[in-house]
Structure formats: C-alpha cells, structure tokens
C-alpha cells in the first residue's frame, strides 16, 4: 500500500496530538491523579500509535505503544500515575516527536527507541505490576468490532472467566475470530488478554459495561474496524480520533476539513488580483452612462467583498494552535534554570491569520525564555525581595480594533535603567546628555543586534537574548513592539499585529508623480500643513499638535525627491505604540484596500518599505512601513 | 424484598457456610439440596432467584443439574461453586447455562460479588 500521500496528514495530525500529550502530561505533573488528563494523554498517544501502525513507522508505533501501556495501566486500575511518571513520559514525548519527524522524512530506520521503550516497560511493570500483555495488539481478522479484553491478575480460573466474557459478548451480537481460540482460552492457555470480533451495533461504552459484568475484567477496548485495507487506511488518518474508543473515553466531536495552506494562499492571491481588477472595473465604468452596467458592477463589487471576507476568515485560526505548545517550553526552561513559576495563557481563542501566527511562534518563544531567564528571579531571591516564591508569567492575546495584541508579562525583577543608560550611551544610541531612559529607549538598546551576546550586559539585568531577531520579525509582518518595565516589579512586552497580512486598509499619499501606501493601522490622523503648526527647534522642523510636539518627517526626503515648498502639503500623523511623528506628503489620494505583495531583498533606503501593491488604476505603489520611520 | 436462594452442595459444611454468608448479607435461603436431582426438584418447587451449585455431587452432577434447570427455566440464575483445578468443568457448566462461578475456599466478599453480578 502506498502510504506516502498520507505522510503529511500524518505529520499534521501527529503534531496536534503531541501538543495534546504535552498539555495533558503537564497537568499530570501537577496532579498525577487527574483522570481526565490521563485519558487525554492516552487518547493522543493511542491515536499516534494507530496512525503510525498504518504508516508502517515502527519506531513511532513501538514507543507510543509503551507510553500508552503505562497510561493504560494507570487508567484501568483507576489509580493515578506515580510522581515520577510524567517526567519519563515527557521525555518519551520528545523522543516520539523526533521519531515522527524522522519517520516522515524517511529516516525512520535510523531511530532507535528500544532503550526508552525498555525503560517505559520496566517502569510500568516494576512500579505498577501492569501485565506485560496490556495494550498488546491482538487484532483478530474478520468483520465487526475488534474487542480486546484484559482480565485482572487476581482472577481465578481465567479460562472459565474468559468464557463468561464471551457469553456476555454473545448477548450483544455474534462473536467470531476469537484469539487465542476458544479451546485455548478455556484451557487457560493465555496470559490475561484475549480478543475477538463482535458483530454488533452496540456502542463501545455499552460493550465495555456489558463485558465488565462478567467480573474480573481489567480493561475492554473496542476498535471500530481493523485497518486491513487501503481504503481503511486512507480513512484512518481522518477518523484517527475515533478509531479506537476505549471504555469511557470520548473524543470531542468536531467537524473540520483540513486544507493545505498553500491552497488558501493560492486562493488569497487570486482574490487579491480580483480586488485589484474590481478597482479598475469601478474606475472604468465611472464615465459610462449605462445605469444597468453600474448596477451589475455594484453587485459584482459587493460579492467580491463578501468573498474576500470569507476567504480571509478561512485563514484565521485561534492562537492556541501555537500557544498550546508553550506550557511545555516554559516548563522545560524553568526547570533548567531552576526557576519556579506559574504560567497562564489568556485569550487563546483569539484568531489570527495563519501565516502571521506561524511567524509569531518563534519570537514568542524567545520572549518567554527571556522572561524566565532574565526576568523571573530565583526562588530565594524572590523571597528575600518580599515576593512570592513562585513567579508569574502571563501570555495573553486580545483583539484591539484591527489589530491583535499579544503580551508577555512577568513579575520578575524588571530592567535596570541606570545600567542600560550607561550601555546605551556607550553604544552611541542614546544622547550622552540624557539622565533617564524611556521604555522606548530601553527597547532600542536591547534590540540592538548582538546585544544578547554581550555577556556583560545579559548578566546584569538584560533580557537581550534574540530581542533584535524578535523585533525584526515582528516588524517584517507589519507589527510593532512595545516594552514596559518597572525595576523590581516586572516587565511586559506587547506585540501588536495586523489581523491579516494579505489585505490591508491603506491611505494613499502622493509625492511628485509617485503614490505610496500607508497602512491605516499606523495612521492616527491627517491635517493640512499650515505655518501655524510647524516650529523650528534646534534646526529641525517639528509639528505642534494640541500642545504635543512631534518630529516632522518629509516623504520627499525619504524617497529622495527634491524638497519643495511645503505650502499646501498634507501631514499624516503616524503612530506606532507610544511613538508618533508627522509625515509631510504632497497630496492625499484617499483610502483604499490594498493587496500586499511582499518585496524581497529590501535593503538600504528601501528598508522603510514593507511591500508593494497594485492600485485600482493598475499603477504599482510601495507600502511605507511606519514602524521603521519612527 | 430479599432475594431467595437455593443452595446445592453434598457437604453440610459447605451448605452451612454458604448459607451463613448469604443470610448475613440479607438473602433468604429458601432451600438446600444434596444432589443434582434434588436441586432440580427443589428448583421446580421453589423457583428461587438464585441457585448456588456445587460441581461434583452424587446422583446427578452439578453440570447436568444446570442443564436441567436451564431447560426448566431459561432465565435461571445459577452460580457454580468450584475448586481450583476444575476449570474444564466450570467451562462446561458455563456452556450449560451457569451465569458465574466462585472458587473454593470461599471468601465471603468474592461470593457476594459474584452473587451481585449474577443477579445484576
């Protein structure tokens, strides 16, 4: 059977299940008796095992099998895990992830999980006396449900007991293909597990309950079908959640279609072209007198708008799809650094464009690690500072107008401004005359490339690891970053992102013959440039706006056009986080929805452009990146 | 109303012991039988909710008795009492219609669990 075309599906599905496993194990680390978490971990590992079996990824299947056995033992005996189980299982989850990636990449043969499997098995038998046959795959061939029954170790006359189980099963339907066969069972030539096919419409729950009534039944598993044909295998990945239903386990019922992101991107691109064509069409009919033509163009326009909204929303995914892997990351970082902390995630249902969400994952990991490494103090330091021994780390997401705001907050030691000031002045970023640093200045300093490698600083109070990378990534996707810190109280870093990258509202500005697009997310207001609002301060023009003094930039200067008399020009007030500035343009051409086309290799002066677009009249325009101007 | 029980065993010791266990648990022991054929007669007469049945008895063995009783009343609930090493006989009894079994030496809790399972 050719399984290669299912590999990608397997990978996606397995990753989801790995996240679920990690999440459940972290819960178990706190409470080893959390039955729901045991079920969740069992279900996820079991699903991976089932899929891996179909794919022929033996290393994955073996490892998942032994993890499952450990969990099944805990579940079926209705006792929790031992305290030492979750760490071992977490280690196994990491190995499982590696095995999955390697198997999909065709390097499954290189993976050796036998040592870990041995440890899991040794652990299971040594600590819980779980029978070695628990979880063994006895999949009898034939029609109907595959039922696997394990009898308790304390069951006397297991052969006779097995007969009673079969009698019970026969009250539900026809029993066939008993493994080992009935004579062997009756003579007790089996360890404790046996299996059979049952042709019945009964639910797995009912089957479980009925068979348990036979007494001394430790576990009952009901598989809907054996994965014996190619058709079954194809369906298996999709039905993986429900492929096995064990006892009381219930998989949440959700109806989803998985779509390759590239297809959505393709649709989005077409949509972009369509939006541009719509703009041209609208302009083309302006001069036409035909009312019917105007009508139909209006209808087409509206439909295109609706379609665009629909396609955009299909790209939106809840942030938990990325956030849910963080508890594990945080736990590992905290452990290795000897920090104690409570990690909470807020707003996990907030939706973001898939492409943006994928981009933001790594920067967030950086920020979380930094917070743990440089923010949260060691337990004894916290105690002597009069704080709770356990630090608090919060990752939150919230919707704010057309942006999504993601914030990492810690209640750690904050950043020492005095030291940062010295550092900033030494680097020549900060005016030597300055006596105090604003939060923005601080961000500038810690976001200097290479800041993190400056050991001297990171050992002070810096949280510099990779902040430059974070800042540039966030800016590259049209976002902005903001930092607030209070010495001794903690630090919060806020990332503001557009909800989607693909289509944005922009203000069109003209200088000379050229048109530039300014994303509306960063436009606060526009005004006429009159002498009354401009002052000259130390040789620089500034904008005086309601008693606020803002730097005044000229778009002509930025794009290297000859500067002309400013009379009659317009000012666009740009705002990124707390920073504001006025930008002088010749003329404003109004607001338009634009389709962002990324431009590659933007360098030098061009770095203030985040992309390009094609306007309704077919003319290209560069998109100005406000964050880089301020 | 408490469930009625018929105890079948050729040993008076076992009948007494089983009777005590069941009575203390609130069951109504309505009759006793020493042989398989007696058990069938008493079942016809008393229609108890439950029968405990020794496997090896004189006259008619427990398995034959189960078969007869089940013929009489397909819904009859018979609990086999067996010694270790009688697995083949227990299996036969189950195929003849016995609903469950307990293994000697009896532990009261095990006996009562089995009775509960059989009575549902």
Image: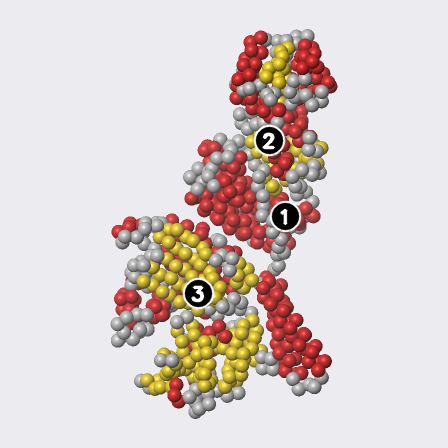
**Badge 3 vs badge 1, beta-carbon distance below 8 Å:** no
Instruction: Compute the Cα span from label 3 to label 1.
Output: 38 Å
Of A274 and A370, which appears nearest the observer? A274
Quarter of the view holding residue A530: bottom left
Mark sitting on residue A239: 1
Asked whether disc 2 touches disc 1, contact meaning CB atoms under 8 Å apart, the reply is no
Residue positioned most to the front: B1
Q: Which residue is at the front of the view, A467 or A167?
A: A167
Dot 1, crowdedness within 10 Å: few (<14), some or many (≥20)?
A: some
Percent position (x, y) of residue A221? 60, 37
Q: Is residue A108 visible?
A: yes
Chain of residue at mark 3: A
Q: Is mark 1 on a helix, strand or loop?
A: loop
Numbered mark located on residue A212 in the image: 2
What residue is drawn where x is 58% and y is 19%?
B27
**Is disc 2 in the same subunit as disc 1?**
yes
Q: Name the residue under label 3.
A: A495
Which quarter shows the C terminus of chain A? bottom left
Q: Mark 1 lies on which chain?
A: A
Decide: few, some or many residues near mark 2? Use Cα within 10 Å; few <14, some 14-19, many ≥20: some
Viewer-side residue, A400 vs A422: A400
Spatial separation of the CA atoms under disc 2 and disc 1: 26 Å
């Amino acid at each position: 059977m050719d399984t290669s075309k299912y590999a990608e599906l397997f990978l996606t599905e397995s990753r989801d299940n790995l996240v679920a496993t990690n999440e459940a194990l972290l819960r178990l680390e706190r409470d080893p008796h959390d039955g729901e978490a045991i079920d969740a971990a069992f279900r996820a590992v079991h699903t991976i095992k089932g899929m891996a079996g179909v794919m022929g990824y033996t290393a994955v299947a073996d490892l998942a099998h032994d993890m499952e056995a450990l969990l099944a033992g805990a579940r079926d005996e209705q006792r929790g895990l031992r305290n030492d189980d979750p760490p071992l299982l977490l280690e196994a989850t990491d190995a499982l992830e590696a095995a999955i990636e390697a198997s999909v990449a065709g390097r499954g043969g290189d993976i050796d999980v036998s040592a870990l499997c041995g440890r899991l098995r040794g652990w299971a038998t040594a600590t819980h006396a779980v029978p070695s046959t628990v979880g063994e795959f006895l999949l009898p061939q034939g029609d109907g449900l595959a039922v696997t029954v394990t009898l308790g170790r304390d069951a006397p006359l297991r052969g006779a007991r097995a007969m009673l189980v079969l009698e019970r099963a026969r009250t539900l339907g026809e029993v066939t293909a008993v493994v080992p066969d009935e004579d062997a069972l009756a003579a007790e030539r089996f360890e404790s597990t046996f299996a059979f096919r049952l042709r019945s419409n009964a639910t797995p729950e009912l089957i479980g309950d009925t068979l348990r009534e036979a007494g001394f039944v430790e576990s009952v598993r009901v598989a809907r079908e054996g994965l014996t044909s190619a058709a079954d295998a194809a369906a298996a990945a999709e039905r993986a959640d429900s492929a096995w239903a064990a006892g009381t386990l219930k998989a949440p019922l959700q109806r989803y279609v998985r779509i390759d992101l590239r297809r959505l991107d393709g649709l989005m691109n077409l949509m972009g072209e369509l939006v541009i064509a719509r703009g041209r069409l609208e302009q083309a009919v302006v001069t036409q007198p035909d009312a019917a033509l105007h009508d139909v163009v209006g209808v087409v326009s509206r439909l295109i708008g609706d379609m665009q909204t629909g396609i955009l929303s299909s790209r939106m995914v809840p942030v938990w799809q990325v956030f849910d892997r963080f508890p594990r990351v945080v736990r590992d970082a905290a452990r290795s650094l000897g920090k104690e902390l409570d990690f909470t995630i807020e707003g996990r249902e907030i939706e973001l464009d898939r492409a943006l969400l994928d981009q933001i994952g790594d920067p967030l990991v950086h920020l979380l690690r930094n917070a743990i490494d440089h923010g949260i103090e060691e337990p004894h330091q916290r105690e002597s500072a009069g704080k709770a021994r356990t630090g608090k780390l919060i990752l939150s997401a919230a919707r704010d107008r057309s942006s999504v705001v993601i914030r990492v907050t810690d209640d750690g030691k904050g950043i020492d401004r005095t030291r940062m000031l010295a550092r900033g002045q030494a680097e020549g970023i900060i005016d030597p005359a300055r006596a105090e640093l604003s939060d923005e200045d601080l961000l500038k300093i810690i976001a200097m490339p290479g800041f993190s490698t400056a050991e001297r600083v990171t050992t002070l109070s810096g949280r510099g690891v990779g902040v430059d990378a974070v800042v540039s990534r966030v800016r590259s996707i049209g976002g902005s970053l903001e930092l607030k810190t209070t010495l001794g109280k903690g630090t919060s870093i806020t990332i503001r992102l557009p909800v989607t990258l693909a289509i944005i509202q922009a203000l069109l500005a003209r200088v000379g013959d050229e048109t530039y697009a300014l994303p509306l997310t960063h436009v606060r207001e526009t005004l006429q440039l009159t002498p009354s609002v401009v002052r000259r301060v130390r040789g620089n023009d500034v904008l005086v706006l309601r008693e606020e003094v803002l730097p005044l930039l000229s778009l002509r200067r930025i794009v290297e056009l000859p500067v002309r008399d400013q009379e009659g020009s317009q000012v666009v007030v740009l705002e990124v986080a707390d920073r504001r500035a006025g930008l002088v343009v010749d003329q404003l051409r109004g607001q338009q929805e634009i389709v962002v086309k990324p431009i590659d290799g933007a360098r030098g002066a061009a770095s203030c452009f985040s992309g390009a677009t094609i306007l309704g009249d077919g003319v290209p325009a560069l998109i100005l990146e406000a964050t880089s101007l301020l | 109303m408490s469930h009625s029980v018929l105890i079948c065993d050729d040993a008076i010791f076992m009948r007494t012991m089983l009777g005590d266990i069941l009575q203390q648990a609130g069951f109504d022991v309505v009759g006793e039988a020493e042989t398989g054929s007696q058990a069938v007669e008493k079942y016809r007469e008393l229609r108890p909710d439950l029968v405990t049945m020794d496997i090896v008895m004189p006259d008619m063995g427990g398995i034959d008795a189960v078969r007869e009783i089940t013929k009489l009343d397909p819904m009859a609930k018979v609990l086999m009492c067996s010694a270790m090493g009688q697995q083949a006989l227990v299996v036969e009894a189950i195929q003849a219609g016995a609903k469950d079994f307990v293994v000697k030496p009896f532990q009261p809790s095990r006996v009562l669990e089995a009775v509960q399972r059989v009575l549902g």
